[in-house]
Image (tube, rainbow, N blue to C red):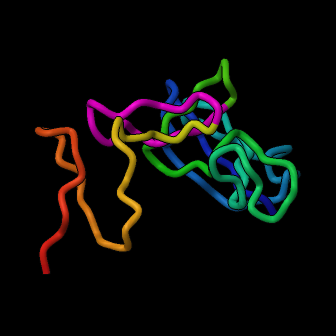
Amino acid sequence: MAHYARVTSGIVTAVIVAEAEFFDNFVDDVAGEWLQTSYNTRGGVHLNGGTPLRKNFASIGYNYDAQADAFYEEQPFPSWELNTTSYIWHAPVEYPDDDEDYVWNEETTSWDAIED
C-alpha cells in the first residue's frame, strides 16, 4: 500500500491509501491528478533511509509545485521564506536554542518567550 494525493490546480484536495493497481480501474470524475506521496519523507529526506519522494508527505491544503515535483505547506507567516531545497518554510530569525518555548511574533518578526 502507498499514499496518494489528489492535486487540483496546485493544491492537495485529498490523500488516500491504495495499491497502485487501484488506479488501473478507478474512475474519478473529480478534476485533478493523483500523485504518490511518501509518509516517511520530510524536507527532502526519507526518515528511514530510503528514497525521498516529492520533498514532503502531502496533506490536504498543501501546495504542489509541479516544476520542482514538491509538496509543501501553506506559508505560515508573510515574513517566512520557503527553502527550495527542503520545501520547508523558515522564519527570518532562527528559533532560540535554550530549551524554552517560543511563539512567532509576525509584528516584530521575532520569537516571543511563552510565559508560564
Report x, y in % for residue 58. 58, 48
| 102 and 44: which is toward the camera | 102
| 15 and 101: which is toward the camera | 101
In the picture, which quadrant includes the N terminus? bottom right
In the picture as drawn, the residue positioned furthest to the top comes out as: 67
Residue 73 magenta: yes
Residue 69 magenta: no
Look at the magenta stretch and give its main secondary structure: loop
Say if 14 sits above or below 39 in the image: above
In the picture, which quadrant includes the C terminus? bottom left
Q: Is 31 on the left-hand or right-hand side of 46?
A: left
| 113 and 24: which is toward the camera | 113
Report x, y in % for residue 83. 54, 32
Q: Quadrant of residue 6?
A: top right
Q: Which residues are magenta?
A: 70-85
In the picture as drawn, the residue positioned furthest to the front comes out as: 98
Say if 85 sits above or below 73 in the image: above
Q: Quadrant of residue 85?
A: top right
Report x, y in % for residue 7. 57, 35
Residue at horizontal 48 percent and vertical 34 percent from the top: 11
Residue at horizontal 49 percent and vertical 34 percent from the top: 63
Say if 95 sits above or below 62 in the image: below
Question: What is the tally of numbered marks visible in this picture?
Answer: 0
Residue at horizontal 47 percent and vertical 31 percent from the top: 82
Q: Is 103 on the left-hand or right-hand side of 44?
A: left
Report x, y in % for residue 31. 55, 30
Residue at horizontal 79 percent and vertical 47 percent from the top: 52
Q: Quadrant of residue 35?
A: top right
